[in-house]
């Protein structure tokens, strides 16, 4: 039996410590389990052991819940993928506990903090992880207050919640726990860059082909424990029928080109499968290559050809003369060149992905700023 009044006291304690943590707590699903020794999160749900909840004080529970919320805030479950999970868990706990120790008295629980060269506020989880891998014999690994098994299936909450808090705190800074989080190296390096990440699946939804819908016993629906039922699944959304042309003219410096490359990789990462055409342009357009992997795209970067000028008109003429009729033409550019007055590609949508604000220089088609 769960004492809901005790849970409400934990919630109140969190609000008193930091109203933003309390706000996140309201947005997160809390579940209780007999099988959980302490507490855990998969990045979206916090699971608390029933016995642990009953035996632990309100103050210590508020610390544990804050600890799990920070794992969620900093997206640790998802970031732990493809790493030594145990060592990454220790690194993440050091970051979280070092952030919390300014605002919480040490709870009556086993806690691991950073020592010596390891600081959870000045180093990211990945940096601490690399240090621990090389110096594991110097660290006491017995002080872990929560369970990280669920990180293997890492999920994440709606990042707009974190973005909303971040935007507000940048306009109204203070000395709160939340301010300490967003000024930590972990947040700056690994969370902040993705807060304003474009939802390319939504932007490019008209060019997605959903390949297979079916039922399979390879995926069992666990909601019905008394029956073995096949689970309905979608094998994957494939991005295709798109031609990307990337600006490699002289006005696009190395910093902007790097930004463009990372944005394209981000587009690819948001789709399970893709098969798109890619060309580079300056005052010429290179022959389009079918690209279906990030590795293949990176290999293309070693073969960039440029005349260093910029001409948008040649793009449309080149596509019009080809036998390829893409559903969408993505022009990734800084936007600085004369544009044709109208789209001569009648059956092709034009999407400008722009590194600079050229709102005063009207271009037809859809504009997306990166």
Image (cartoon, rainbow, N blue to C red):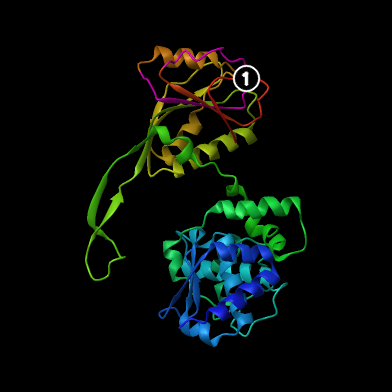
Instruction: Choose top left, top right, bottom left or bottom right for residue 323.
Output: top left
Residue 184 painted magenta: no
Instruction: Choose top left, top right, bottom left or bottom right for residue 67.
Output: bottom right
Asked if residue 117 shows in the view, the reply is: no
What residue lies at 41% left-to-right and 32% top-to-bottom?
Answer: 206
**Quarter of the image with the C terminus in it:** top right
In the displayed orientation, state which residue is furthest to the front: 5
Looking at the picture, how far across and down is residue 249, in whole percent? 60, 23
In the displayed orientation, state which residue is furthest to the bottom: 55
Q: Which residue does the numbered mark 1 point to in the structure image?
A: 362
> Counting other residues with Cα less than 10 Å from the Cα at mark 1, is it few (<14), some (14-19), or many (20 or more)?
few
Query: Horizontal placement of 161 versus 240: left or right?
Result: right
Residue 200 against residue 36 in the figure, above or below? above
Residue 331 painted magenta: yes
Query: Horizontal placement of 73 versus 325: left or right?
Result: right
Residue 85 against residue 247 in the figure, above or below? below
Q: Secondary structure at mark 1?
A: loop
Q: Which residues are magenta?
A: 324-346
Residue 261 against residue 191 in the figure, above or below? above
Residue 256 against residue 325 in the figure, above or below? below
In this view, the residue in front, 18 or 207, is 18
In this view, the residue in front, 286 or 201, is 201
Looking at the picture, how far across and down is residue 199, in whole percent? 51, 42
What residue lies at 44% left-to-right and 40% top-to-bottom?
Answer: 294
Instruction: Choose top left, top right, bottom left or bottom right for residue 231.
Output: bottom left
What residue lies at 49% left-to-right and 19% top-to-bottom?
Answer: 285
């Amino acid at each position: 039996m769960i004492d809901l009044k005790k849970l409400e006291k934990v919630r109140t304690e969190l609000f008193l410590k930091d109203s933003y943590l309390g706000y996140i707590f309201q947005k997160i699903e809390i579940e209780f389990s007999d099988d959980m020794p302490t507490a855990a999160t998969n990045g979206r749900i916090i699971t608390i052991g029933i016995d642990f909840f009953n035996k632990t004080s309100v103050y210590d529970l508020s610390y544990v819940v804050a600890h799990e919320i920070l794992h969620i805030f900093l997206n640790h479950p998802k970031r732990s993928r493809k790493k030594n999970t145990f060592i990454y868990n220790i690194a993440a706990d050091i970051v979280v506990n070092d952030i919390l120790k300014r605002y919480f008295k040490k709870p009556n629980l086993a806690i691991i903090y950073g020592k010596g060269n390891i600081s959870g506020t000045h180093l990211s989880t990945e940096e601490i992880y690399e240090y621990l891998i090389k110096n594991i014999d110097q660290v006491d690994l017995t002080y872990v207050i929560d369970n990280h098994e669920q990180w293997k299936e890492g999920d994440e909450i709606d990042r707009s919640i974190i973005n909303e808090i971040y935007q507000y705190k940048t306009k109204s800074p203070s000395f709160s726990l939340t301010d300490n989080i967003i000024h930590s190296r972990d947040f700056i390096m690994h969370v902040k860059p993705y807060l304003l990440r474009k939802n390319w699946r939504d932007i490019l939804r008209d060019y997605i082909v959903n390949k297979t819908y079916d039922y399979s016993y390879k995926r069992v629906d666990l909601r019905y424990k008394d029956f073995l039922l096949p689970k309905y699944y979608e094998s994957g959304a494939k991005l295709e029928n798109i031609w990307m042309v990337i600006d490699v003219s002289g006005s696009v410096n190395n910093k902007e080109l790097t930004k463009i490359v990372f944005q394209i990789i981000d587009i690819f990462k948001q789709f399970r499968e893709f098969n798109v055409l890619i060309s580079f342009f300056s005052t010429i357009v290179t022959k389009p290559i079918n690209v279906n992997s990030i590795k293949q795209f990176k290999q293309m970067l070693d073969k960039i050809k440029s005349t260093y000028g910029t001409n948008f008109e040649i793009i449309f003429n080149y596509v019009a003369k080809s036998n390829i009729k893409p559903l969408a033409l993505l022009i990734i550019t800084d936007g600085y060149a004369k544009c044709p007055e109208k789209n001569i590609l009648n059956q092709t949508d034009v999407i400008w992905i722009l590194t600079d604000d050229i709102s005063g220089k009207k271009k037809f088609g859809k504009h997306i700023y990166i």
